[in-house]
Image: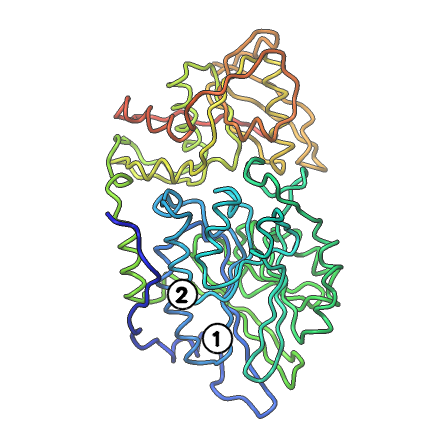
C-alpha cells in the first residue's frame, strides 16, 4: 500500500448527542454576562491506540457545540504500543494525523515519545498541527525551537490560560527510555523549572501544569505549588482518577491509559477569577465514533506484513507473568541461554487470545528495538544484575525466566530488597560460583550498574525479532513458561 499521503481534510460530522453530554457534565448552556465556562478535554498515555481516537473526536465536537471554550490536551506518551503506528515509515504519522483531526491544542512530551530517538520526536512535532510542550527539556542547538516550554491560550472572554509542561526524569536524570534515545538532550529538574516559570502566574488568570510525572509527584507538586498552579493534568502512572483529586486546592486529573477514558474538566470563571472547577471521567466506550476518523483508522491499519500469521497459541494468555514468560522463553529458545532477564516495563500487553499469532502481536508485546545481549555470569553476578535492574527501574522487579528468585523486602520500604535468593525451577538453590549463560536486552544493561568479569556479546538481532524467529520456528506455542518472582 502507498503510505505517502498529504494532510487530510475529511468530511462533516454527524450531529453529536448534545443533550446526553449536557446531562453528564451538568453544564448549563447559558452563562451570565461576567461568567465564562472553559472545558478541558484531557487524555494521557494513549500509546498509539489510534483506533479509539474516533470516539474522542466525537466527544470533542459534541462539547464544542455546547461551549465555545474547549481545550484538548494530551499529557504525553502518544506513541509506542501499536505497531501500525510505531513501525510506520514516517515516525508516528498515523497517531499524529488522527490527533490533528481530533483537534488537539497541545501535548506534553512523555518518556516514550523519545522511543524513536530525537529524530523521531522531531518528525512527530513537524507533522503535528499543535505544539509539543516540555519546559524541562532542551534539545540540541540545531533543533532548538522545535519544543515549547509553555503555551498561553486566550478564551473568547479574554481569560488567559497558561499551560506549562513537565517531563518525568529517573534517578539517572533522563526520562525512562533507552539512554541512546536522548543523546545530546539536556534535562532540568522539575522544581527548578517551575521556579523559572513563576512569571506565568502574573501573566495568566489560570495556570495548568500538563505533566508526565506520575500521580505521586503530581500530589507533591500540588502541596508545594498551590500558589502557582490551579489544575494539574497528569500522566505516566496510568492512574484512573474518578471525578478528579483535590490536594491543597489544586485539582489533579488523570485518565488511565490507551484512551479507555477521557477527563472533561469544567472551569467556571466570574470576570477572570476561578469560581468553580470540577472533573468528570468519561468512558469512551460509550461514545459514538466519528465516521471520517474511522476511515483514517482503517487506512492506517491496512498493512499486509503486520497482519500476517506467524504461529498459533494454544491457550489464551491473561497475565503479565505468562506474557513475560513467552518473551523470555523465546529468547532462551533461540540463544540456548540458561536464563533470561527482562525489565518489568518491557512487557507492554498482558493479554493474547488463543489462536493465530500475528506479527503485529509481537510488536505489541515488545515495541522496543533493543539489541539482544548474551552474558556469562556467575550466580552472584546474576543476583547483582537483578538487584541493579530493580533499583534502576523505579523499584519494579525484573522478570527471570528459566529460574526463579525470592526477594524479601524491607517492611517499612518495599522498594528496598533485604535478601534475594536464586533457585532452580525444581526449587534447589543456585551454585553462586557457577557460570550461567544469561540473555537480556541492551536496555537492561544500559540501566543496570553491576560488576561482572566476562565480556558481554551483542547479537546482531533485536529482541522482538528474536521472538518472531522463535514463534515462526516453533509454530505451535502450547504452554509458555511463567516468570518466577516471589516477593515477601
Label annotation for residue 173: none
Which residue: 72% across, 70% down?
201
Viewer-nearest of discs 2 and 1:
2
| Residues at discs 2 and 1 in contact (Cβ within 8 Å) | no
Residue 158: give x, y in percent of width and height: 60, 82
Residue 86: give x, y in percent of width and height: 40, 44
Residue 60: give x, y in percent of width and height: 42, 70
Q: Is residue 98 left or right of residue 451?
A: left
Residue 484: give x, y in percent of width and height: 49, 25
Which residue: 66% across, 30% down?
409
Above-or-below relation of 85 to 41: above
First of labels 2, 1 by sequence position:
1
Label annotation for residue 25: 1
In-front residue for pair 315/295:
295
Q: Is residue 437 left or right of residue 150?
A: left
Which residue: 56% across, 22% down?
405
Label annotation for residue 102: 2
Q: To which quarter of the image does residue 132 belong?
A: bottom right
Task: Check disc 1 and report its element: helix, strand or loop.
Answer: helix
Above-or-below relation of 84 to 267: above
Q: Is residue 72 left or right of residue 353?
A: right
Q: To which quarter of the image does residue 315 belong?
A: top left
Distance between the alpha carbons at the discs numbered 2 and 1: 20 Å
In-front residue for pair 306/67:
306
Amino acid at each position: 500500500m502507498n503510505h505517502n499521503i498529504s494532510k487530510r481534510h475529511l468530511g462533516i460530522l454527524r450531529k453529536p448527542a448534545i443533550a446526553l453530554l449536557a446531562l453528564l457534565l451538568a453544564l448549563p448552556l447559558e452563562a451570565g454576562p461576567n461568567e465564562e465556562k472553559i472545558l478541558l478535554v484531557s487524555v494521557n498515555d494513549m500509546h498509539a491506540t489510534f483506533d479509539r481516537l474516533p470516539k474522542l473526536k466525537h466527544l470533542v465536537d459534541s462539547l464544542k457545540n455546547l461551549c465555545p471554550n474547549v481545550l484538548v490536551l494530551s499529557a504525553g506518551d502518544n506513541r509506542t504500543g501499536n505497531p501500525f503506528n510505531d513501525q510506520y515509515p514516517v515516525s508516528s504519522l498515523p497517531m499524529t494525523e488522527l490527533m490533528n483531526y481530533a483537534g488537539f491544542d497541545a501535548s506534553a512530551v512523555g518518556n516514550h515519545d523519545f522511543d524513536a530517538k530525537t529524530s523521531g520526536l522531531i518528525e512527530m512535532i513537524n507533522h503535528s498541527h499543535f505544539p509539543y510542550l516540555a519546559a524541562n527539556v532542551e534539545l540540541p542547538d540545531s533543533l532548538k525551537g522545535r519544543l515549547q516550554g509553555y503555551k498561553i491560550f486566550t478564551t473568547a472572554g479574554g481569560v488567559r490560560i497558561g499551560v506549562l509542561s513537565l517531563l518525568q526524569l529517573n534517578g539517572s536524570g533522563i526520562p525512562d527510555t533507552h539512554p541512546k534515545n536522548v543523546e545530546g538532550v539536556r534535562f532540568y529538574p522539575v522544581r527548578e523549572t517551575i521556579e523559572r516559570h513563576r512569571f506565568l502566574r502574573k501573566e495568566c488568570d489560570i495556570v495548568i501544569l500538563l505533566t508526565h510525572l506520575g500521580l505521586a509527584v503530581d500530589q507533591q507538586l500540588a502541596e508545594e505549588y498551590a500558589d502557582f498552579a490551579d489544575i494539574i493534568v497528569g500522566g505516566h502512572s496510568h492512574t484512573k482518577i474518578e471525578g478528579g483529586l483535590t490536594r491543597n486546592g489544586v485539582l489533579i486529573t488523570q485518565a488511565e491509559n490507551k484512551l479507555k477514558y477521557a477527563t472533561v474538566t469544567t472551569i467556571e470563571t466570574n470576570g477572570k477569577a476561578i469560581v468553580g472547577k470540577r472533573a468528570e471521567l468519561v468512558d469512551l466506550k460509550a461514545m459514538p465514533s466519528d465516521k471520517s476518523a474511522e476511515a483514517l483508522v482503517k487506512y492506517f491499519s491496512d498493512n499486509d506484513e503486520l497482519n500476517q500469521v506467524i504461529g498459533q497459541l494454544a491457550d489464551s494468555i491473561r497475565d503479565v507473568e505468562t506474557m513475560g514468560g513467552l518473551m523470555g522463553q523465546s529468547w532462551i529458545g533461540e540463544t540456548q541461554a540458561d536464563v533470561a532477564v527482562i525489565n518489568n516495563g518491557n512487557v507492554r500487553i498482558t493479554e493474547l487470545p488463543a489462536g493465530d499469532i500475528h506479527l503485529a502481536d509481537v510488536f505489541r508485546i515488545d515495541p522496543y528495538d533493543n539489541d539482544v545481549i548474551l552474558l556469562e555470569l556467575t550466580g552472584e553476578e546474576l543476583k547483582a544484575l537483578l538487584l541493579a535492574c530493580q533499583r534502576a527501574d523505579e523499584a519494579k522487579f525484573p522478570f527471570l525466566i528459566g529460574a526463579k528468585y525470592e526477594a524479601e523486602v524491607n517492611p517499612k520500604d518495599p522498594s528496598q530488597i533485604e535478601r534475594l535468593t536464586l533457585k532452580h525451577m525444581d526449587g534447589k538453590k543456585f551454585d553462586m560460583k557457577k557460570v550461567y549463560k544469561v540473555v537480556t536486552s541492551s536496555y537492561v544493561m544500559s540501566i543496570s550498574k553491576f560488576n561482572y568479569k566476562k565480556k558481554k556479546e551483542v547479537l546482531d538481532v533485536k529482541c522482538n525479532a528474536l521472538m518472531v524467529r522463535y514463534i515462526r520456528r516453533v509454530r505451535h506455542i502450547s504452554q509458555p513458561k511463567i516468570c518466577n518472582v516471589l516477593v515477601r
